[in-house]
Amino acid sequence: MPRTAQSAMLHLIEGNPNNKTKKELHKRLKNEQEMAVSAKNMDAPAWLSIGAKKEFKRIVDLFKGTTVLNEADIAELALYADTISEYKACNTRLKKNGRSLDGKPNPDLRLKMQLGEKIDKYARSLGLTPTARASLAINKEESKAGDDDFE
């Protein structure tokens, strides 16, 4: 199975495992910088519930001042916030109705597990898990040291 594309800076950090030339990496880095997206208008979509909007704003505030999230990530962040909101609602229904209904497992149990998996997927892709942040931090620290390669 082919690997997903990685940024040029990540190639440098990993020791250039794909053996790209400095010229190729420089061109790729320049192209990535040209494609950078603004993070000025990080507003929650109108379709989100009140609880989901609060989660959306919480995450945006956490990452304010970084380049991790930008306007291109609004849809994925909105899906994450909406899924968190639905997870909380599901959990509330489980606490109210119990884990079984009429002797059968409550359908909210399965839904809660499915939502948990989705939340984990979104969190990893948005850099919201400890391992995702550790990876971002390692890449950020190393990227400053590797900048000399292109000067």
Image: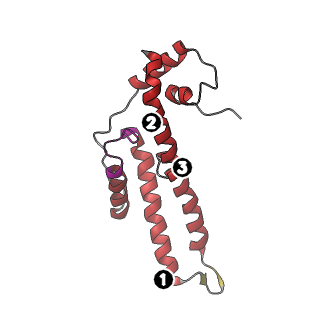
Determine the secondary structure under disc 1.
helix
Query: In which quadrant will I find the C terminus?
Result: top left
Residue 134, given in percent of the width and then of the height, sits at 50, 46
Q: How far apart are marks 1 and 3 (CA)?
A: 34 Å
- Depicted 53 relative to depicted 3: above or below: below
Residue named by callout 2: 140
The dominant secondary structure in magenta is loop
- Residue at figure coordinates x 35%, y 51% from the top left: 62
Disc 3 residue crowd, few under 14, some 14–19, many 20+, Cα 10 Å: few
> Label 1 sits on what residue type?
Lys
- Residue at figure coordinates x 33%, y 63% from the top left: 50
Determine the secondary structure under disc 2.
helix
Residue 149, given in percent of the width and then of the height, sits at 48, 18
**Mark 2 vs mark 1: which is more N-terminal?**
1
Residue named by callout 3: 131
- Depicted 10 relative to depicted 26: above or below: below
> Label 2 sits on what residue type?
Lys
Whether residue 62 appears in magenta in the rendering, the answer is: yes
Q: Do the residues labelled 2 and 3 touch (CB within 8 Å)?
A: no
- Depicted 33 relative to depicted 108: above or below: above
Q: In the rendered image, is residue 31 in sight?
A: no
Residue 96: numbered disc: 1
**Mark 1 vs mark 3: which is more N-terminal?**
1
